[in-house]
Image (cartoon, rainbow, N blue to C red):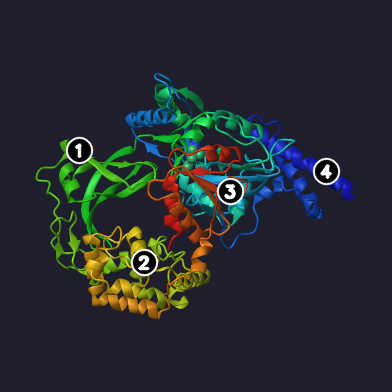
Amino acid sequence: MTDKAEKQIAELSKTLNEHLYRYHVQDSPTVSDAEYDALFKQLEQLEAQHPHLIKPDSPTHRVGGPPLEGFEQVKHKVPMLSLNNAFTFEELSDFDRSVRERLETEEGGEVTYLAEPKLDGLAISLRYESGILVQAATRGDGTTGENVTDNIRTISMLPLKLRTKKPPAVLEVRGEVFMDTASFDESNKSLIAAGDKPFVNPRNAAAGSLRQLDSRKTAKRRLSIYVYSLGEVEGVEAPASQFKILQWLSGFGLPTNTEIKECIGPEACFKFYEFILKRRPLLGYDIDGVVFKVDDMIQQRELGFRSRTPRWAIAQKFPAEEAQTQLLDVEFQVGRTGALTPVARLEPVFVGGVTVSNATLHNMDEIERKDIRRKDTVIVRRAGDVIPEVARVVVERRKKGARKVKMPARCPVCSSPVERADGDAVARCTGGLSCAAQRREGIKHYASRRAMDIDGLGDKLVEQLSEAGLINSIDDLYKLTAEQLTSLPRMGEKSATNLLESLEKAKQTTLARFVFGLGIRDVGEGGAAALADHFGSLDAIMAADETSLETVEDIGPVVSASVVAFFANADNRAMINALIDHGVNFPVLEKAAVEQRLEGNTYVLTGTLSSMSRDQAKQKLQRLGAKVSGSVSKKTTAVYAGASPGSKVTKAESLNVPVFDEDALQALLNENEL
Ligand code: D41
């Protein structure tokens, strides 16, 4: 009986997967939807009777499972890089020139690029082990992403099992998840019908669906995916060009974009760009540019990386969309350090995929340069995910006597005098912590990822809490109670508990993060780290005078003055004491604790470094617990190569060990040193 069921289940799985492939990838279905559904039901019933026979590639996995509490973190074995952008053809030919220079291409020689439309979605990494999809993770910051496997399994065009008899031991592929225009319209129709808010654009729809904790909901949205590059690969030799890699992946049944072209030299790239720009409305999905990649893998390796971006690829972005609208008013927003930023309030206008009702005016000089006046008709511009801005004024439509924009003499929030110090580019509210806006912005900064990293406490929630009068200063965060929180709209017991837990968890931090979190003017992340490093304790930093501050590397007179002024202020000192009383702590880390951070990693250094000697680099890595080895092996985590590296790079490449440059080494040290 079981034998028969096993066979039936295997056959049904195979048939259904074949139908999905024909429908989504080959675009030539051979059964009707109703026939597919009938087979699917049959499989579901059989699997219900024999749950132990369910296959990892069963299409029934695609309907989603019980909701998750949260997403697990996934560390990418091979980092996910980002792309440099070009906005003009000049930038594209600069890119081509630097590629040719680095490759020492002979005079008149051209480089072959593979051009791919740049999908406006979310980057994802998929891991197949022995041909089975075992994990899917978002890009995150490129190093660590979130495990969204359940959600990715619902994408019906994606094989849960590679279509090959001999799958590689490990095949990690990277691609873009997106929602096509038809599915976007369909999703929004059903959201509206259910009385819910529709998605603003397909990218947000894809992001929302991907980050959905209840994968059964994701299954109801029709997401798409195209894969375009490799991560970790084991047990097989990958092809030698980008074009061949795409063909290879497609041969495994993985969806790849067919709108690609090999372009020889920059002129051919321009041509393709213009061709795709014309085709854009016919594609059926959103793209925001074209990606050009050096096709030859040997050349790619030769070019290498610049910290987080490959030198062999560039995204040529489409021009920002523009729209005309009315400038209703100019308001001034007060930032964390009191800086007043002019913001345009606009008659809402749909541009670049979203409705824009505010746009930044940057600063007074910018307003003057563009001669923006109250009630003007203006052109608003928005590119991709950048902040919308006022591009220019339609002067012909200006009404007589249109008034110029003036910096207010008093802070719009606290009425303290506004001053523009000599040599300062911006005017500031002089209210300090007596200004509610400065306090609110300071709290946002304190909670932010690079500072105290309080999970779940984003800008919106800080605003909500401030408006409700629950927090007036940073230390108020630690006085919040579950009762207060649940009294807020859209805040359940669970979210309240989670927030309190993350506040508690984030109390344990590092001196550098804490100092950065204080929001001292002119003290960025690097400055805070330098202070922490040099002085070792908060007391020592607070006691330092300008002369001793200036002995710190990277700290100049401006920063020193700001630091002294900050700690001289009694309100600030009281706030710091309150935080410490609430249990915020930054233990002076023992050597052993420092050493944790790169433990288990083995690096190889080669070539000449410019900012330090190889020995210094070695010591720094070792202090963080890493091993530094003289030779490359399969166990090597990464090779860091300075100028004129030798055979170690070639060896690393043959073993698929990632090779990075000095910038990346610097970034690694900066990230992990305390
Ligand atoms: O279509 C895309 N959005 C796309 C993104 C693409 N076609 N190719 C890409 N290639 C890369 C490299 C060259 C780094 C492998 C990418 C991205 N990266 C990318 N997407 C998001 C961050 C980086």
Residue indicated by mark 2: 532
Q: Which mark is residue 636?
A: 3
> Which of the two labelled residues, at mark 2 and mark 1, occupies the earlier sequence position?
1
Q: Residues within 10 Å of mark 3 (few under 14, many from 20)?
A: many
Instruction: Check disc 4 and report its element: helix, strand or loop.
Output: helix
Residue sitting nearer the eye, 490 or 455: 455
> Which of the two labelled residues, at mark 2 and mark 4, occupies the earlier sequence position?
4
Question: Label 1 to label 3, Cα distance in Å?
Answer: 59 Å
Q: Between tags 1 and 3, which lies in front?
A: 3
Q: Between tags 4 and 3, which lies in front?
A: 3
Q: Would you say the residues marked 1 and 4 are in contact, meaning their CB atoms lie under 8 Å apart?
A: no
The x, y position of residue 664, in whole percent, is: 44, 48
Which residue is situated farthest in the bottom direction here?
Answer: 581
In the rendered view, does 149 fall on the left or right side of 343?
right
Would you identify the image quadrant in which residue 83 lies?
Answer: top left
The reply to whether residue 227 is visible in this rendering is: no
Would you identify the image quadrant in which residue 92 lies?
Answer: top left
The x, y position of residue 204, in whole percent, is: 46, 48
Q: Which mark is residue 394?
A: 1
> Which of the two labelled residues, at mark 1 and mark 3, occupies the earlier sequence position?
1
Question: Label 4 to label 3, Cα distance in Å?
Answer: 46 Å
Would you identify the image quadrant in which residue 326 lies?
Answer: top left
What amino acid is at disc 3? Answer: Thr
Question: Label 1 to label 4, Cα distance in Å?
Answer: 69 Å
Residue indicated by mark 4: 8
In the rendered view, does 367 fall on the left or right side of 52?
left
